[in-house]
Image (cartoon, grey):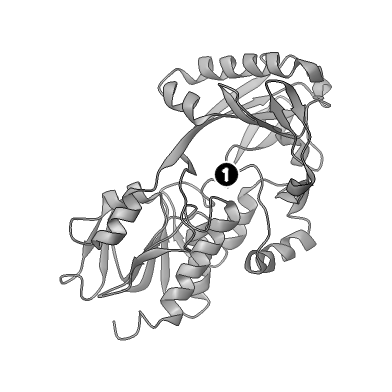
């Protein structure tokens, strides 16, 4: 039997697993995807100009807490993490607003893709990828641990940490396994969807002319655009990433993705004319990613919630500690430390 099973290999799950494994516990991480990092996601796209990296999830991250900085600084030292920019202008219906001085701080990225952070956190962990959890049962009436049923078998552990969006986690648990207060709080956490459009252009368009990162305010379609290729050390060709607003994403979720992407790029072409970019709605290649659980709408300030007794069942993730990449890391780390420091695994 494992000491702890962690469901989800995003930053929260990986940070928790590292904390627990460093104390000598037997920890298994179960992840439904092919890779680690969650929404710190990077695609490799084969183009006529060679392989191109594209960050289609989280675009950057901050580093404000001493705990996260302790993890990130070694990556900065070896060049895996760098400052992308400190100022983010905003596109409004009236034009461009520069960032005010109160919002000037480092936004970090990874030259080799944002999944660099997840890959680093995953080192030396026991992670089983492409493993979909189907249900979770209590062993012996929830007195001796948990049984996790997956698409290819089952696993047992003395404690359980769930890091997916709460609605997904609750769907795995049978009635009576979560305390009512915890259940009510988890059900109240909502997420906004997002559709990410990735577009690649000819090398001759290298300058692009638009800001590397740009917030869009009061726009009916777009919330964010970025020249993703500006993160790379020696980009083969320019790449644009555009995120749609939650409202637009909900209303057009089931539409043909290619048609939707062209509509988004045509809108960008119109709104960004002032920068004189290349013809944005005629890319060389185009890909789309739908994120159903893109951003928590009402994150909680606590690092984790759950029930330590009779056997530990904790919930953590990007919806804790504020809705940030850094918050997901802090949430997982704190959940792992709570299991260790409160003695909840003792005697199980």
Residue 199 drawn above or below residue 305: above
- The reply, left or right, for residue 314 in relation to residue 235 is left
Other-residue count near label 1 (Cα within 10 Å), few / some / many at <14 / 14–19 / ≥20: many
- The reply, left or right, for residue 230 in relation to residue 173 is right
Residue 105 percent coordinates (x, y): 76, 51
| Residue pictured at 58% horizontal, 52% vertical | 325
Q: Residue furthest bottom?
A: 347
What is the quadrant of residue 343 in the picture? bottom left
> In this view of the protein, which residue sits in the foreground, 192 or 101?
101
Residue 194 percent coordinates (x, y): 51, 33
Regarding residue 60, the answer to whether it shows in the image is yes
> In this view of the protein, which residue sits in the foreground, 219 or 254?
219
Residue 198 percent coordinates (x, y): 62, 28
Q: Residue furthest left?
A: 141
What is the count of numbered marks? 1
| Residue pictured at 47% horizontal, 60% vertical | 13
> In this view of the protein, which residue sits in the foreground, 168 or 324?
324
| Residue pictured at 43% horizontal, 22% vertical | 251
Q: Which residue is mark 1?
A: 41
- The reply, left or right, for residue 195 in relation to residue 283 is left
Residue 16 drawn above or below residue 233: below
Q: Secondary structure at mark 1?
A: loop
Query: Looking at the figure, which quarter contains the C terminus?
Result: bottom left
Query: Looking at the figure, which quarter contains the N terminus?
Result: bottom left
- The reply, left or right, for residue 300 in relation to residue 327 is left
């Amino acid at each position: 039997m494992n000491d702890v099973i962690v469901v989800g290999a995003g930053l929260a799950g990986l940070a928790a697993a590292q904390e627990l494994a460093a104390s000598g516990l037997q920890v298994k991480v179960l992840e439904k995807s092919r890779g680690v990092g969650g929404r710190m996601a990077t695609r490799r796209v084969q183009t006529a100009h060679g392989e191109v990296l594209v960050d289609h999830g989280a675009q950057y991250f901050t580093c404000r807490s001493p705990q996260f900085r302790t993890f990130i600084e070694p990556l900065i030292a070896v060049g895996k993490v760098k400052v992308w920019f400190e100022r983010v202008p905003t596109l409004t219906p009236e034009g461009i607003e520069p960032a005010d001085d109160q919002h000037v701080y480092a936004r970090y990225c990874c030259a080799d893709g944002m999944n660099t952070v997840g890959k680093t956190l995953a080192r030396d962990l026991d992670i089983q990828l492409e493993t979909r959890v189907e249900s979770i049962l209590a062993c012996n009436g929830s007195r001796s641990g948990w049984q996790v049923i997956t698409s290819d078998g089952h696993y047992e552990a003395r404690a359980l940490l769930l890091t997916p969006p709460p609605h997904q986690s609750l769907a795995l648990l049978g009635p009576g396994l979560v305390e009512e207060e915890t259940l009510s709080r988890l059900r109240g956490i909502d997420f906004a969807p997002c559709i990410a459009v990735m577009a690649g252009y000819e090398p001759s368009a290298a300058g692009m002319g638009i800001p590397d990162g740009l917030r869009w305010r009061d726009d009916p379609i777009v919330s964010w655009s970025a020249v993703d290729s500006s993160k790379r050390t020696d980009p083969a060709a320019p790449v644009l990433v555009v995120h749609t607003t939650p409202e637009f994403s909900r209303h057009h979720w089931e539409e043909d993705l290619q048609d939707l992407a062209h509509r988004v790029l045509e809108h960008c072409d119109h709104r960004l004319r002032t920068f004189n970019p290349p013809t944005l709605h005629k890319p060389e290649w185009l890909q789309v990613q739908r994120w159903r659980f893109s951003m928590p709408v009402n994150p909680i300030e606590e690092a984790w919630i759950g029930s330590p007794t009779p056997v530990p069942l904790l919930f953590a993730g990007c919806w804790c500690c504020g809705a940030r990449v850094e918050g997901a890391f802090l949430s997982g780390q704190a959940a792992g430390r709570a299991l260790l420091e409160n003695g909840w695994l003792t005697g199980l």
